[in-house]
Amino acid sequence: MMNTGEIETLDGLDGIEEEQLYCDTNREERVEPFDPKAVDIVSEPMVVANIIEQLKYDDILLEPDFQRHPNLWTPRQQSRLIESLIIRIPLPTFYFDRLDDDKLIVVDGLQRLYTLKKFMALDENDPERLVLTELEYLKEYEGKKFEGLPPIIQRRIKQQPLTTYIIRSGTPDKVRTSIFNRINTGGLTLEPAEIKNSVYRGQAANLLKELAHSNEFVKVTRSKIDSSRMLDCEFVNRFLAFYLLGTKKYSGNLEDYLNDVMIRLQKETEPTIEKCRKDFLKAMKYAVDIFGNTAFRKINSDGRYGRINKPLYDAVTVNLAKLDEEDCQKLLDRKDRLIEKYTALLADKKFVDIITRGTAAINNVEGRYKAIHKIFQEVLEDD
């Protein structure tokens, strides 16, 4: 084992170990049938003026929780988009997700819509208002706001047709998730957790965010997980999937599995939600008390601890969550014996392989859960 001094020198290691979910030997396990009839997307003809009207009244949501980077484009990029409208170059297709209250969430086209808002929907004296700059052809319009353009040009911009597709509100959540994944091509592509936060709005998404921001989770992960893209919520999602559904219901497609637990959480009763909350926080507390700074980290070939490993995190925390408080405390009291067995497990080539390569394979998922469960039980039964 490392001494404390060696561990401290590793705290500069940021982030998460890259996970290889699938390999060629288990690629077929993630193939799932997809019913094309469940895709409910309609085309709705619009012109720029329609979009501007909806932006003014916040009927298009540009900054929901999952879209945290609405203003990535430079003034030059934004100005050139407006120039395209003036010279009648068609803009790429826009995709929206319709909420139950008829408001729209942007799936693809965020930067373009934010540009239109800055140029036409904000108050004329708003400091965020876009002033045209570095145009390629129409140099005579540089330094102009929308109101400063000739009336004929203003009308031309407002009347420019747009191609828009809208995901209808009744579309099944898993189908909507797949649509988000396939059509999101923005300047900053959405992470899976950001997509889930939009699709599974309400109880499920709120629980993920609450637990990801808990002191217990932040402490055990040493603030090394980037919360700006909701990667911390992905960790919570993984825990809840294996905790609530168990490995027996896992079919080899991790993304579908994570969606399945979100669907279930949307319908769960408050007592079940409270038990999830309590057991999650318990698992995080005992994980840091037992494993300290080395929690969820493999031992590299040079004998030094590496970055946080997602599969190791899953297996350790869910196994802890399944134990009652008394057994968790017993593991803590017998910490030295547990660390000895745990360190030996991290040195076992077969175990390292199942938390490193093809980690979404059914056998690898079951194997790592059984391995962690086994050493926990050995320590608990060792009198």
Image (cartoon, grey):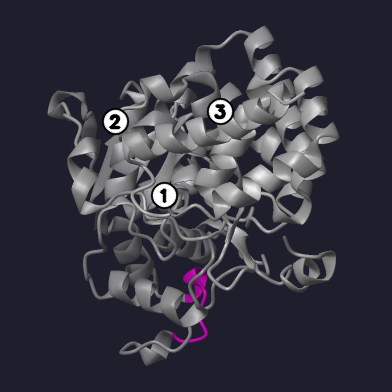
- Residue 6 is marked as none
Q: Residue at x 21, y 65 (%)?
A: 90
Q: Is residue 139 visible?
A: yes
> Is 166 on the left or on the right of 242, as rendered?
left
Above or below residue 223? Residue 71 is below
Cα distance in 3D space between marks 3 and 1: 26 Å
Q: Residue furthest front?
A: 383
Residue that numbered label 2 is attached to: 175
Query: In the depicted view, which residue is nearer to us: 296 or 33?
Result: 296
Question: Which of pointers 3 and 2 indicates the residue nearer the eye?
Answer: 3
Q: Which residue is drawn at 29% across and 57% down?
A: 159
Amino acid type, label 1: Lys
Q: Earlier in the sequence, mark 3 or mark 2?
A: 2
Q: Residue 77: where, in percent of width, then height?
A: 42, 78
How many labels were placed on the picture?
3
Cα distance in 3D space between marks 1 and 2: 36 Å
Examine the structure image and report whether residue 196 is included in the region drawn in magenta. no
Q: What stretch is highlighted in magenta?
A: 142-148
Above or below residue 208? Residue 133 is below
Q: Which residue is drawn at 60% across and 30% down?
A: 318
Few, some or many residues within 10 Å of mark 2 (<14, 14–19, 20+): some
Residue that numbered label 1 is attached to: 350
Amino acid type, label 3: Leu
- Residue 240 is marked as 3
Is mark 1 in CB contact (under 8 Å) with mark 2? no
| Quadrant in the picture for the C terminus | top right
Q: Residue 119: where, in percent of width, then height?
A: 50, 66
